[in-house]
Image (cartoon, rainbow, N blue to C red):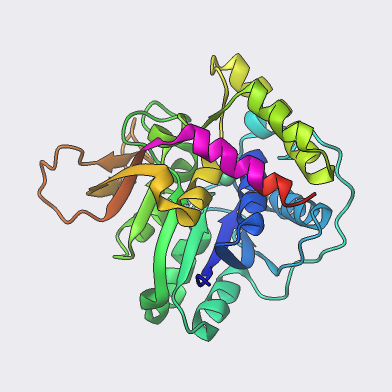
Amino acid sequence: MINKIPVIIDCDPGHDDAIALLLAFASERLDVKGVTIVGGNQTLEKTLNNALKVLSFADINVPVAKGADKPLMRELIIAPEVHGDSGLDGPCLPESHLKPCDLSAVEFIAKIVKESEEKITLIPTGALTNIAQFLICYPELKNKIERISLMGGACFGGNWTPAAEFNILVDPEAADIVFKSGIPITMSGLDVTHRALIYKEDIERIRAIGGKVAVMVAELLDFFSKFHGQMGFEGSPLHDPCAVAWVIDPTILKTKKLHVDIETKGEHTLGCTVVDYYDVLKKEKNVEVAFDIDRERFVDMLVQAMNNYK
Ligand SMILES: [Ca+2]
């Protein structure tokens, strides 16, 4: 029997966060120790509520810890254009019967990491505020992090400004701390997530599985695809599930090891992940940057995961 990979998911649900969570909990490869929440796609209160609702609806009982309500040094940016007023518009979900745990996200991550015999993999799919605070508060635990597989950034072009991807832009100072930490990082940025497209026929494949979770996911994707349709996308880019999919099966993404810095000061480029694609700096290559995905296998992985909730 293969050992499961112990992970913590740090997220801001968010349609694609919700699907990333469901993908992770359905996987036989992952042992999800807990979920920590950050503000981003919507306010912290809403992203926390969304996470609790989705987990409760899918009958998943796991510790959920509330994290930062704003970035380290800035005011919060939210994305109602993409995710609606609730942060998870589309399906009508009942109120959750789950409650967040007493520990803060940072305390929770520290507790799990301390208690675990194995190193923990962190999967952040929102702004990196909680992860940076954890590294600031518990530097002695850094060596017990196996890797960070994150959704964020881009080598070529942003989605919230011409230079910056949303998650990194929300808290560039936090991203800077994480990218300089020395912990191995896999970055699923826009270069790959804009190829992780889910088309109408894929949504229908998920809906046809039946059962409340698959139908909810199809309804999330219906809402998500309306926004992306208006933006001129042929399908919906499933950003956050890429970061989970890579931990489940690293062969699903094509990556290149490169040096990446975070721009924290630029007038036009704040929040940019400056990827040294041509190795002009000859600096240490600190990030596995993902550029492509086996889309068919990715969709099959999602379909199989949703099938497990029937
Ligand atoms: Ca997210």
Q: Please report the residue visible at 31 percent of the width from the left and 50 percent of the height from the top.
A: 288
Q: Judge whether residue 300 is colored magenta.
A: yes
* Left or right, 24 with reference to 210: left
Q: What is the magenta range?
A: 292-304
**x%, y% of residue 204?**
72, 26
The quarter of the rendering in which ligand 1 is drawn is top right
**x%, y% of residue 57?**
83, 52
Q: Please report the residue visible at 36 percent of the width from the left and 28 percent of the height from the top.
A: 157
Identify the main secondary structure in magenta: helix
Residue 41 visible: no
Q: Please report the residue visible at 55 percent of the width from the left and 45 percent of the height from the top.
A: 241
Q: Nearer the viewer, residue 153 or 210?
A: 210
* Left or right, 41 with reference to 54: left
Q: Please report the residue visible at 71 percent of the width from the left and 34 percent of the height from the top.
A: 206
- On the image, which quarter does residue 183 sit in? bottom left
Is residue 145 positioned above or below 35 on the image? below
- On the image, which quarter does residue 293 sit in? top left
**x%, y% of residue 89?**
76, 34
Residue 130 visible: yes
* Left or right, 72 with reference to 65: left
Q: Judge whether residue 241 is colored magenta.
A: no
**x%, y% of residue 9?**
57, 60
Is residue 207 positioned above or below 10 on the image? above
Q: Nearer the viewer, residue 29 or 277?
A: 29
* Left or right, 253 with reference to 71: left
Q: Nearer the viewer, residue 170 or 59?
A: 59
Query: How many dots with numbers?
Result: 0
